[in-house]
Amino acid sequence: MASKKADGGKEQTSGGFTLGDVTRLVDSLEGSDVRTLVWTRGGEKVIIRRGPAPVSVVAPAAAPVALAAPVLPVAAPVPAPAGPSAPAAKAAEKAPEKPGHMVSSPFVGTFYRAPSPDSPAFVDVGSVVKKGQVLCIVEAMKLMNEIEAEVAGKIAEIYVANATPVEFGAKLFRIEPA
């Protein structure tokens, strides 16, 4: 970038930007709503961006499958009646859990019942499992993590549908000990 002083002491360029040019551009953006300015002079280009960096969100490949899951109708919430029956409703909510060992998700990810889409499921309801046997896969950050049975027994319930997202601590299986 060649520059020379003109008669008035101003710096002039022969096609490029000076530090003063860039400073004036930045100052002119100070009071405006402009977030990005691109200016080309000669063979040089100046790009000025203000504000936070744009955030891009990448969804895992299995996420669209979760959207295809059937949606069940949900009943509208009914207000609890005031009075002595309110404690009875709270007692009904804390019904005892079914007997057996709960297998929960150790992290957030996508639950898979089989090692590949065309393979049979690792286990089904009624399957007898040994301690250490693979029950499912939870994919987290493109890593396939096998979830193993912590106890020997029979699969009593499977709480999650195949290829659906799960949260940390979400119930996956209930195993009735042998």
Image (cartoon, helix red, strand yellow):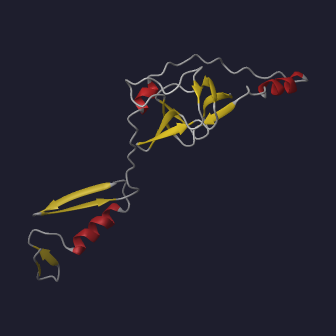
Question: Does residue 20 lie above or below 93 as drawn?
Answer: below
Question: Does residue 26 lie above or below 4 as drawn?
Answer: above
**Residue found at the very far right of the displayed protein:** 84
Residue 113 position, x and y percent, is 48, 28
Q: Quarter holding the N terminus?
A: bottom left
Question: Does residue 79 lie above or below 16 as drawn?
Answer: above
Which residue sits at x=80%, y=23%? 92
Side of 76 relative to 16 (left or right): right
Residue nearer the viewer, 165 or 42: 165
The quadrant in which residue 125 appears is top right
Which residue sits at x=47%, y=25%? 121
Residue 154 position, x and y percent, is 63, 25
Residue 35 position, x and y percent, is 34, 54
Residue nearer the viewer, 4 or 137: 137
Side of 120 relative to 129 (left or right): left
Q: Quarter holding the C terminus?
A: top right
Residue nearer the viewer, 54 or 95: 95
Question: Across the whole image, how many numbered discs are drawn on residues?
Answer: 0
Question: Does residue 167 lie above or below 81 as drawn?
Answer: below
Side of 159 relative to 68 (left or right): right
Residue 82 position, x and y percent, is 86, 24
Which residue sits at x=22%, y=70%? 21
The quadrant in which residue 173 appears is top right
